[in-house]
Amino acid sequence: MREDLFTTIIRSTRGIGDGILMSPIVETIYSITGEKVNLYLHPDVIPVFINNPFVSILDKYNKFNFSSDYYDLTSAEIQYELTTQPNIVKNKTEIWCDKIGLDYSKPRSPKIYLSQSEVYDGKYFLREIKNNKKKIIALGYASLEPWRNYPFIVELGNLLNKDYSVIAIHHESVTANLKVEKYLIGESLRKVFSVINSCDMVVGPDTSHIHIAGALKIPIYGIFGPTNGEVRLSNYSRDCDKIFPKSFSLCKRQHCWYETCKDIWCLKTLSPREIKAQIDEYFSSSY
């Protein structure tokens, strides 16, 4: 047992996906120390760790509410990515392992823990459309970072809804031009977890919905352009054979990450019909 490991972690910034990617760190520290971990996080991220069996204290970040022995995971990953881009090869969990001094040779996968009532709530929300026997696709409408967004997400949603039951998910309103089976707008994060848990696939840009699906072992179609999906999703592919990441770089150049070109051609040159064709192929070969 390592006595030099701290059991308190703080992170003051937003980022649901980042919170999910922290869960292997929490589990690893517990496995080494035998002690549950105290987390002080941005309020938006706290729901990620509800029901997590390796967490003791779960509270809002405040610079006065934790002891001096802690790990601050607020900025290590962005510092690494900004200094090494475009040659980024480490995922965020690996970066935090390096910071803390944890072995990453046998990494754990990110996890979200749902209660039985939450599992039931997700099934109940989708009860009407489950009767039509179509595959259910959750459509992650947009990222908090506009440069990651797929510019034809409305056209894609409408196209997919012809053959699938599409659920549009977003934290605020979506355009009226998006005509899909059902909408999940402005709901709590735990509600989003429960609904995604009952879907057959999640489709969307580099945003939290993709990470939620990965943590719940739901098939993923990630629409990646400036960021590298193979790096972003590498945590989830280790113990799940249903991960379906797509990392497009159709401009034939290296992923540009945070220094995107003006027009973001890698996403603008990807047609909704191409995406749907690959999703069709996935379902036809998997079921």
Image (cartoon, rainbow, N blue to C red):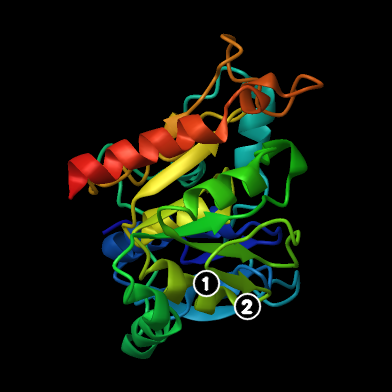
Nearest to N terminus: mark 2 or mark 1: 2
Q: Residue at x 26, y 47 (%)?
A: 242
Q: Nearer the viewer, residue 198 or 189?
A: 198
Q: Nearer the viewer, residue 93 or 196?
A: 196
**Element marked by disc 1:** helix
Q: Is residue 204 above or below residue 192?
A: above
Task: Check disc 2 and give the amino acid type.
Answer: Glu
Q: Nearer the viewer, residue 36 or 116?
A: 116
Q: What residue is pinned by disc 1? A: 192
Report x, y in % for residue 167. 52, 65
Locate the N terminus by quadrant: bottom left
User: Cβ–Cβ below 8 Å for labels 2 and 1?
Assistant: yes
Q: Is residue 168 above or below residue 81?
A: below
Report x, y in % for residue 259. 75, 23
Report x, y in % for residue 222. 48, 41
Q: Is residue 46 above or below residue 287?
A: below
Report x, y in % for residue 2. 32, 56
3D distance between C-alphas at marks 2 and 1: 7 Å
**Residue lying at the far top of the rendered structure:** 252
Residue 74 is at least partly visible in this image: yes
The quarter of the picture where residue 51 lies is bottom left
**Element marked by disc 2:** loop
Q: What residue is pinned by disc 2? A: 187
The quarter of the picture where residue 41 lies is bottom right
**Residue lying at the far bottom of the rendered structure:** 117
Q: Residue at x 47, y 53 (%)?
A: 162
Q: Residue at x 75, y 62 (%)?
A: 176
Task: Check disc 1 and give the amino acid type.
Answer: Val
